[in-house]
Image (cartoon, helix red, strand yellow):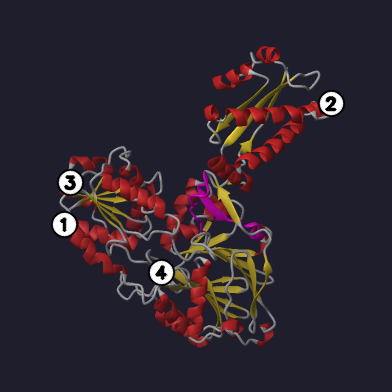
Amino acid sequence: MTDSMLVNNEDSANGSVSIIPLGGLGEFGMNMMVYETENDVIVIDTGFMLPNSEMPGVDLIFPDIHYLVERKEKIRGILLTHGHEDHIGALAYVLRQLDVPVYGTQLTLAIASGRLREYGVLGKAQLNTIVPGDTVELGDFSAEFIHVTHSIPDSVAIALHTPIGIIVHTGDFKFDMTPVDGKLSDIQTLARLGAEGVLMLISDSTNAERPGQTPSERSIYDTIDHIFQRTEQKLFLCTFSSSLHRIQQFINLANLHRRLIAVSGRSLLNNVRIASELGYLDVNPDYLIDARDAAMFKPHEVMILSTGSQGEPRSAMALMALDNHPFLKVEQGDTVVISARIIPGNEKVIGNVVNHLLRRGAKIYHERNADVHVSGHGSSEDLKLMLNLLQPKFFMPMHGEYQNLMRHAELAESVGIPSENITVAEDGELIHLTPETCEVFGREGRSGRVLVDGKPEIELEDIVLRDRIQLSEEGILVPIIVLHSDTGLVASSTEDNEGSDGIDDADNTKTALNAGQIEIISRGFVYMDESEELIEEAKEITRRVIENLSDEQKHETEIVQDEVRGALRKFFAKQMQRTPLIFPVVMRV
């Protein structure tokens, strides 16, 4: 390492590095961290987050990257720590707006390429393959890639050698002493960096609240083996499509117990194919069958690998649970293993899938009733080991909800890092790091979340999401008002009938118009047959509002709609303590 990289370099002692988390601090997922000097910017990870039940119609959540777009000329590269979607899933969205090189290990880039191809940006992407041990020069930054163990192969931590010192960004990790692929975390390099002097450590906090050390991935092997031995009919194994170490164990056990392997789920099929071609999965092709052919074999001869460990509505397992899968069925006596962590917020949908599977007569194993899952993230003792190896001057926890970050801060203090040198930040805050200080000095005003409905280019505005939530909770009310085109007053019933001939709405809307001067249609708000008095009063309020408008206002449709909407919102809020979405329809005859 050159003198320019040392913490005490006199020429750069007055320099600084800004650290801006655009995602991953305060939630699980959407991981994205920005490092910036006066001249250069680098980004580590570009992940997405899945929506919760309070986000109807939202497919994905990306970090807001306005901060990066405004500095696109300074960006020297995007560095990827591993191939999980919460770290690479937003890459296509980012590369649509930024033309910058991307650096990652072979498997990480291969998995990312599938999504880049799907969204039409693979052709322009500058993908650069690195191997652990490589160092890449990126302006003021020199990025050193360090192998760490996780639940997917080819995972790395990154040591950033900067003009003011070394910053270590761990990515996701645990210290697995018996990894499935035999590749241990590079403890020697971590210890070397600690001996040289680490200015700041930014470390994974996902399991900070779990005591002890996270067990090895191999620790579930005996439990899964026992399940294989006891299962006399079909065996379904459901896990994350990128948990390749887990999948390798399932494949090994299928071979041992002479079961053919069927793979269901597009992402799982893609990842198994990619990992097999690159040598990260050892799969005997003689044991692989098309999932469409699974029914041709005896139940005890088949193992089905499936997606849907988080209860995703359109996943293979969710479809099977409802007996809606086109060619796979879970039947009486079958066994289903859900080998994945239940992500907070997904408990209900996963519970629904489990309930439906039980109704089909299946035996279910999951992390709460059997040792069928082990985390890929380090628990408290792993985190303390990382802290002790690197001995950083400053520390900042990342990845996880605020309670996870706070617990990790406590762990750092317990191993001797002074509390004043520990920074607990959240998304969008700007951290100012110098050789002597680390502090939050403001907030990036344009940071936040981008809600996606469908493809990455279809961004969902917050107001649309609020409308969807209100629709789901309060319903919708449509006042249909026919005004005389000359006077602006409510037209008579006769005029309604004459003016309704050209209306191409649904039959019930035509009927409403023919029935009187003002009609109101409700969906999801009140049951019309039992709310006649309430609706009649709302009609009368609507009539009075229009009568009280000036002649000019009566002829401005938007003004009529706004006045009616405001009056009815106040009325229903007072009468029912509910405020449906109100969409007045104004027609003129």
455 versus 197 height, above or below: above
Q: Amino acid at mark 3?
A: Pro
Q: Magenta residues, as a range?
A: 47-68
Question: Is any atom of residue 125 visible in this view?
Answer: no
**Of pointers 3 and 2, the one earlier in the residue sequence:** 3
Viewport quadrant of the N terminus: bottom right
Instruction: Give whichever of 46, 273 is nearer the camera.
Output: 46
Instruction: Give whichever of 60, 346 is nearer the camera.
Output: 346
The secondary element bearing badge 3 is classed as helix
221 versus 305 height, above or below: below
**Of pointers 2 and 4, the one earlier in the residue sequence:** 4
Which residue bears the numbered disc 2? 551
Residue 574: give x, y in percent of width and height: 65, 42
The residue carrying pointer 4 sits among few (fewer than 14), some (14 to 19) or many (20 or more) residues within 10 Å by Cα, namely many
Comparing labels 2 and 1, the label whose residue is closer to the camera: 2
Q: Amino acid at mark 1?
A: Arg
168 versus 487 height, above or below: below
Which residue bears the numbered disc 3? 299
Instruction: Please say if the residues under marks 1 and 3 sit with CB atoms less than 8 Å apart.
Output: no
Q: Amino acid at mark 2?
A: Asp
The secondary element bearing badge 4 is classed as loop
Q: Amino acid at mark 4?
A: His
- In whole angstroms, how far apart are the C-alphas of marks 2 and 4? 69 Å
The residue carrying pointer 1 sits among few (fewer than 14), some (14 to 19) or many (20 or more) residues within 10 Å by Cα, namely few
Comparing labels 3 and 2, the label whose residue is closer to the camera: 2
The tally of labels here is 4
Residue 219: give x, y in percent of width and height: 27, 69
Comparing labels 2 and 4, the label whose residue is closer to the camera: 2
Q: Which image quadrant is residue 224 in?
A: bottom left
Instruction: Please say if the residues under marks 3 and 4 sit with CB atoms less than 8 Å apart.
Output: no
Residue 377's tag is 4
